Image: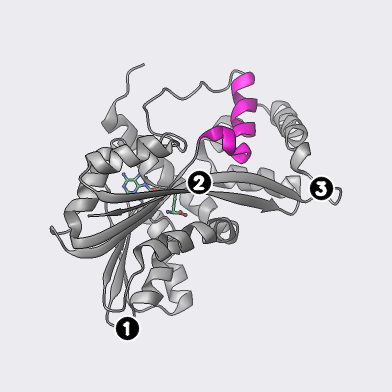
Amino acid sequence: MSFDANTHREASLRNWEEAASGWTRRQELLRELGAPVSHWMLEAVSPRPGERVLELAAGLGETGMLAAELVAPMGGVIISDQAEAMLEGARARALALGLSNVEFQVLNAEWIDLPVASVDAVICRWGYMLMADPGTALSETRRVLRPGGRTALAVWDAIDYNPWALLPARELLERGLSSPPQPGTPGPFALGSSQALAELLERSGFSGVRMAELALVRRHSSFEELWDSTLDLSRVFHDTVLERPEAEIEEIKYALADRFAPYTARDGTLEIPGRTLLAYADA
Ligand SMILES: C[S@@+](CC[C@H](N)C(=O)[O-])C[C@H]1O[C@@H](n2cnc3c(N)ncnc32)[C@H](O)[C@@H]1O
């Protein structure tokens, strides 16, 4: 089947509007998992007091809210996402943190609804690989950056380095419940190559590209908690599994517990490795 960008955009928006409640429920897990990634990105772009920072595909706005503290009191952060429901979760968090220099904007990163040269830094954690045309989104990113502006982004490395996603994907594939992703189409692991990502940044007009990889650990108190988190965080897994008959859902669950056994300690807790790619570039 050929890839249709607009069909993807519509499905992605629907998918993430629906995923927002599960993501909000799992925000502590995401915060812990993503903290080293956000810190790398912020260290790379080093937002200064008074600057204006844009976070793209922000989800619950974790990284943007950390940036808000760095640019305060005169500077501010625009936390943006295509999905209004994600931004609702982000608003609630900003309120809880008492942040007053954060604004929220629903926007698609492929059409950034901001003037040319209007921000000092753009950050995007785990967003570009999901977009229909990441090259266009990166060109848009550069367009809104002032001369001397900086960007930092994170994408997942190849799925083989991310067993938290590989094992559920394999289970569904081997059961004939899903098909392998088509090369060159958007998805969590679509930009999982340092070289390809660096080239994409350069083709989009960026210079001074610097790449890194970061090992992460996903921690769960039990397999049950891993199962529930996976249902909450992956809409594809959620929809594919939950439409099966009850007995088959149980089979899938037991089979997955087996697959995750190598990452399960005697007390039932799990530590599952992951790996993310990071990039910094000058506009
Ligand atoms: C994997 S989540 C990451 C959320 C957040 N950045 C984080 O690290 O926790 C991906 C987010 O990207 C958003 N997204 C995907 N494609 C987008 C696009 N073209 N424009 C804006 N947001 C997009 C989704 O709505 C979703 O909130």
Is 41 displayed left or right of 21 in the figure? left
Q: Residue at x 36, y 35 (%)?
A: 196
Q: Which residue is mark 1?
A: 73
Q: Is residue 173 magenta?
A: yes
Name the one closer to the observer, 166 or 245. Answer: 166
Q: Which residue is mark 3?
A: 265
The amino acid type, in three-letter code, at marker 3 is Ala
Main secondary structure found in the magenta portion: helix
- Asked if residue 61 is positioned above or below residue 159 in the image, the reply reads below
Mark 1: few/some/many CA within 10 Å (<14, 14-19, 20+)? few
The amino acid type, in three-letter code, at marker 1 is Pro
Q: Find the distance from the CA under tag 2 to the CA under tag 3.
A: 24 Å
Q: Quadrant of residue 130?
A: top left
Q: Is residue 202 magenta?
A: no
Q: Which residue is mark 2?
A: 276
Q: Are marks 2 and 3 in contact (CB under 8 Å)?
A: no
Residue, far right:
266
Quick one: label 3 or label 1, which is nearer the N terminus? Answer: 1
Query: Ligand 1 closer than 8 Å to the CB at disc 2?
Result: no
x and y percentages locating residue 8 in the rendered image: 33, 32
Callout 3: SS: loop
The amino acid type, in three-letter code, at marker 2 is Thr
x and y percentages locating residue 178 in the rendered image: 54, 23
